[in-house]
Amino acid sequence: MVSERLKRIILQALQLEDFDMQDETTASMVPGWDSLSHVRVIIAIEESYGIRFKTLEVIRLKNVGELQRMIAAKSG
């Protein structure tokens, strides 16, 4: 399940008011989440959680649920 914290970070990075995000939500489903804004989203997540992603980890992500699980794993 996508946490409210992660949802809030993503929405803020994309300058959106609201969007119903589920585990299976992909970037292409979210308005304004393109390859350029993807960088802003990842940086915002890294700063908020105090973690760092490797490039290959980011490339392999398929949906928001996988992103949430990776954050949990890196956050300890």
Image (cartoon, rainbow, N blue to C red):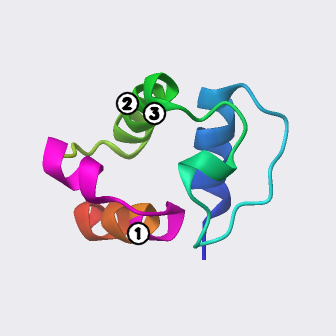
**Circle 3 is placed at which residue position?**
38
- Considering only vertical position in the picture, is 31 above or below 28? above
Q: Is residue 65 left or right of residue 7?
A: left
Alpha-carbon span between mark 1 and mark 2: 17 Å
Image coords of residue 61 (percent x, y):
34, 59
Say which residue label 2 marks: 43
Quarter of the image where one finds residue 23:
bottom right
Q: Is residue 27 above or below residue 63?
A: above
The CA span between labels 3 and 2 is: 9 Å
User: What amino acid is labelled 1 in the image?
Assistant: Glu
User: Is 43 positioned to the left or the right of 27 in the image?
Assistant: left
Residue count near mark 2 (Cα–Cα under 10 Å), binned few <14, some 14–19, many ≥20: some
| Element carrying mark 3 | helix
Compared with 29, 44 (above or below) is above
Location of residue 67 in the rendering, given as x and y in whole percent from the top left corner: 41, 61
Q: Is residue 61 magenta?
A: yes
| Secondary structure under the numbered disc 2 in the rendered image | helix
Q: Position of residue 63 (x, y in %)?
A: 48, 63
